[in-house]
Image (cartoon, rainbow, N blue to C red):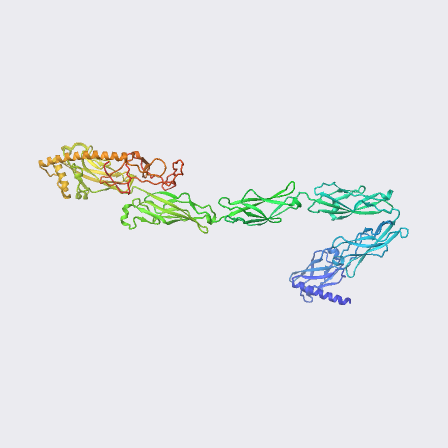
């Protein structure tokens, strides 16, 4: 029978070893207490070694975690038991009990891990604390009295440690088993029949403890029960259960209660002592102590409601009789909760960042709030501090949600520091808090906005291609791509108005796209010139710049740019040919050159001998394509000799006699006249005038002939003579011309005075304050008040604008608001300003101003 059992065990062990090898580790199992020499396993075979290979490759154990009591046979390669295996000594109560071994195999070197499990056998019998237990029971003990007994212990584990108790047969006693918990059983001795010391003074019983092993092992304890005489009354408590309540913050030494037991006997048999026998839970022995004399129970340790809220104690009262009698009562100590634990706030889930367009009610975080106290001390209320768009809502017990209660605006607040506060209902209340950082993510809800709706830019003509004219910037308070702005020229709102002189070659009425003049950098917003600007071709360029962000969907904003081209002195004065009939217009006092004479570069004129000082001989006509100060011409006479008989008007170009002419002056004079503008640097042109001196009658006839003949008559020889009748006719003509001239001058003065006195003054600037006319050129700003404004008229009746006026971009003031002076930005070569600055001009008092619809070249004329 034993050999078959061993063979079956061996097969199980081999199968288990093979399975372990398949998993990469050799595992064996051996029962404890196996005899020395017992083969645990054929390790060499399980490792797949041939016969003799284990010894040749020196198969050996090289490491043992603890004393394994096994060895490796070098010859056979078998794992053998070499000493006693005691599972309880190796592992105690731990299950399973596994020993880990390392096996070394050389040539080549390999290390194998072997796990040896020592299985438990029922080799330990139950053991009582003592072999004998002495009990003293008074003969007066009533049936049903109970006497607790100490149980046995078993070092084995599992079913081998499951104990049961039996009591040897007795007429007076029986055994009752009380389950203290699922695993432990407490035996109690129960008196079933009254005792009689005179009959049986001592009762000897055997208490047997049996484990659950196969075969079962037992342990015994002898119970020696002495029956005491005389003292036949046991102490009696005045109540079987004492219930006491104490707050958990009660200090050590506090009186819990006082138990009291009385004994009906007299003398020493009535003296009672108290002791604590049982503690439930066992930690209660550190909490209370009982005074053996008085029965007072005091605290010896701290109470904690959150750890243990009820203690059960068994108090024994024993008398001092020859045969001490005892009785028991139960003390139930209930621990009352105090508010000694603050709430705890934990974040279960946090969903950040929160989009600024998140709907009201969006859950941002889930919070768990708990308080270890109970009752009102454990009831918690939560709120958010400081006031913010977030609030706390309770979802179920102990769980709260941080939700959005107001709409968010990232541009106003990009991040919130939220503090969730919790307060319990105790007195005093305890608080706790948890801080949360809630960033707000951006959405594209703001369009780019320029600082101004209209920008005024000043640029000089003849600028270099690629020059920076202005820099625009649009602000988008969004972030990342939503706030990344790109700029472009919007052709839908762009165009350029050319000068009237260039309209003749344009079929579109003078309008050209702004993209042919300027471009806008997409990233920086800089406005570049694509080509040099020409004031004579273009004075004002208006276009719109669009700023678009990179959001989804993209948003945009527009700004209008008004580009004013400033004139440069890039054109020299040009001499004009004399018009037909100019001699008659001069009143017969002088004659100007004919077309043929002008074509040869020399002007011809005649003057009479004896002409008084101031007599107009000729008039030089010139024009400058520039504008303003650059087109204001002055005339200078380069005299060949000092104090010559002629002079030229500084601004009129009229050549007149500087003194009365006499025969000493000679018959012909050649004058070199320089026409110069006021630009910097000044540009000039030169005219040559040849003046012939004639007798008065000849000069009058020449003037009359010039007024009625063709241009060919102007080429008459300077020495032609006239008769006496011609001189008389010339004198009459002079008188008529003088009378007409004086009348005309008087009438013109009256008309001009009336026009200046009663003409309505037009508002030039739309900004609040007094109206101001502004003359602009390169050298600064100069303004005339309306009171001192004058008009400039050219000789041929054409008017030229020497004035440029800009309408400022000021919004109309609100009703009742006091007007404020605009504060333009500092001027520079290239201006980008919030209001149109004044075009610059050189301050020069005599410069007249004339406002007209179109700009035309300025022709020198008399003032």
x then y, percent, for residue 326 = 83, 47
Name the image quarter holding the C terminus: top left
Left/right placement of residue 14 relative to residue 484 reads right
x then y, percent, for residue 698 = 12, 37
Q: Quadrant of residue 565?
A: top left
Toward the right, the furthest residue is 198
Q: Is residue 373 visible?
A: no
Q: Quadrant of residue 55?
A: bottom right
x then y, percent, for residue 231 = 87, 46
Name the image quarter holding the N terminus: bottom right
Q: Is residue 79 visible?
A: yes
Q: Quadrant of residue 540?
A: top left
Above or below — where is 648 with respect to 544?
above
Above or below — where is 33 with respect to 551?
below
Total count of labels: 0
x then y, percent, for residue 522 = 41, 49
Residue under the point 43% across and 46% down? 448
Viewer-closest of 332 and 189: 332
Left/right placement of residue 183 relative to residue 781 reads right
Left/right placement of residue 731 relative to residue 55 reads left
């Amino acid at each position: 029978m034993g050999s078959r059992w061993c063979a079956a065990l061996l097969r199980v062990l081999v199968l288990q070893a093979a399975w372990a090898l398949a998993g990469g580790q050799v595992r064996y199992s051996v029962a404890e207490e196996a005899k020395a020499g017992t083969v645990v396993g054929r390790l060499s075979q399980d490792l797949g070694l041939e016969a003799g290979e284990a010894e040749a490759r020196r198969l050996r154990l090289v490491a043992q975690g603890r004393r394994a009591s096994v060895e490796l046979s070098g010859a056979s390669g078998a794992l053998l038991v070499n000493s006693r295996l005691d599972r309880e000594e190796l592992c105690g109560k731990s299950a399973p009990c596994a020993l880990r071994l390392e096996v070394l195999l050389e040539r080549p070197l390999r290390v194998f891990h072997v796990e040896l499990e020592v299985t438990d056998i029922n080799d330990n019998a139950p053991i009582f604390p003592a072999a004998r237990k002495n009990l003293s029971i008074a003969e007066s003990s009533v049936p049903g009295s109970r006497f607790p007994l100490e149980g046995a212990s078993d070092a084995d584990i599992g079913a081998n440690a499951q104990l049961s108790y039996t009591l040897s047969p007795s007429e007076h006693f029986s055994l009752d088993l009380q389950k203290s918990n699922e695993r432990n059983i407490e035996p109690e001795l129960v008196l079933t029949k009254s005792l009689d010391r005179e009959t049986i003074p001592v009762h000897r019983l055997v208490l047997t403890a049996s484990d659950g092993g196969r075969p079962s092992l037992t342990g015994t304890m002898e119970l020696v029960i002495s029956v005491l005489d005389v003292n036949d009354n046991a102490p009696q408590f005045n109540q079987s259960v004492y219930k006491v309540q104490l707050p958990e913050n009660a200090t050590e030494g506090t009186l819990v209660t006082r138990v009291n037991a009385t004994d009906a006997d007299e003398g020493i048999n009535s003296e009672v002592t108290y002791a604590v026998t049982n503690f439930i839970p066992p930690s209660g022995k550190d909490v209370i102590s009982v005074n053996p004399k008085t029965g007072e129970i005091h605290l010896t340790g701290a109470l904690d409601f959150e750890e243990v809220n009820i203690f059960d104690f068994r108090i024994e009262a024993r008398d001092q009789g020859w045969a001490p009698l005892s009785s028991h009562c139960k003390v139930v100590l209930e621990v009352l909760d105090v508010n000694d634990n603050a709430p705890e706030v934990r974040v279960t889930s946090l969903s950040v960042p929160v989009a600024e367009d998140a709907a009201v009610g969006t859950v941002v975080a889930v919070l768990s709030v708990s308080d270890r106290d109970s009752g009102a001390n454990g009831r918690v209320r939560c709120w958010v501090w400081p006031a913010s768009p977030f609030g706390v809502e309770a979802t179920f017990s102990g769980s709260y949600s941080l939700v959005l209660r107001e709409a968010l605006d990232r541009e106003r607040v990009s991040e919130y520091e939220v503090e969730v506060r919790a307060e319990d209902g105790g007195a005093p209340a305890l608080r706790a808090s948890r801080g949360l950082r809630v960033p707000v993510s951006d959405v594209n809800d703001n369009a780019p906005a320029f600082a101004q709706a209209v920008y005024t830019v000043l640029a000089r003509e003849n600028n270099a291609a690629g020059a920076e004219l202005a820099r625009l910037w649009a602000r988008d308070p969004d972030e990342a791509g939503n706030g990344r702005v790109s700029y472009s020229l919007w052709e839908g709102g762009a165009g350029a108005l050319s000068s009237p002189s260039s309209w003749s070659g344009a079929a579109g009425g003078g309008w050209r796209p702004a993209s042919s003049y300027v471009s806008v950098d997409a990233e920086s917003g800089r406005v570049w010139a694509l080509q040099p600007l020409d004031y004579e071709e273009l004075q004002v360029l208006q276009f719109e710049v669009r700023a678009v962000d990179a959001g989804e969907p993209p948003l945009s904003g527009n700004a209008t740019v008004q580009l004013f081209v400033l004139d440069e002195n890039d054109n020299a004065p040009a001499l004009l040919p004399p018009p037909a009939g100019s001699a008659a217009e001069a009143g017969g006092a002088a004659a100007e050159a004919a077309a043929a004479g002008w074509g040869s570069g020399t002007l011809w004129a005649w003057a009479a001998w004896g002409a008084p000082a101031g007599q107009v001989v000729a008039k030089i006509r010139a024009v400058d394509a520039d504008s303003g100060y650059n087109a204001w011409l002055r005339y200078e006479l380069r005299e060949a000799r000092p104090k010559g008989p002629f002079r030229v008007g500084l601004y009129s170009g009229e050549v007149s006699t500087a003194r009365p002419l006499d025969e000493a002056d000679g018959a012909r004079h050649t004058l070199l006249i320089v026409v110069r503008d006021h630009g910097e640097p000044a540009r000039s042109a030169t005219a040559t005038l040849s003046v012939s001196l004639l007798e008065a009658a000849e000069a009058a006839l020449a003037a009359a002939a010039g007024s009625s003949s063709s241009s060919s008559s102007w080429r008459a020889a300077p020495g032609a003579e006239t008769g006496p009748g011609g001189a008389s006719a010339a004198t009459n003509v002079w008188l008529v011309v003088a009378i007409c001239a004086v009348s005309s001058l008087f009438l013109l003065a009256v008309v001009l005075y009336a026009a200046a006195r009663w003409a309505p003054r037009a508002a030039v600037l739309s900004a609040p304050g007094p109206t101001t006319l502004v003359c602009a050129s390169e050298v600064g700003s100069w303004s005339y008040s309306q009171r001192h404004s004058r008009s400039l008229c050219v000789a041929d009746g054409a008017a030229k604008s020497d004035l440029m006026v800009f309408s400022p971009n000021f919004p109309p003031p609100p009703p009742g608001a006091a007007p404020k002076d605009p504060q333009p930005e500092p001027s520079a070569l290239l201006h980008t300003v919030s209001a149109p600055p004044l075009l610059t001009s050189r301050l020069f008092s005599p410069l007249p101003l004339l406002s007209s619809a179109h700009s035309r070249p300025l022709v020198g004329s008399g003032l």
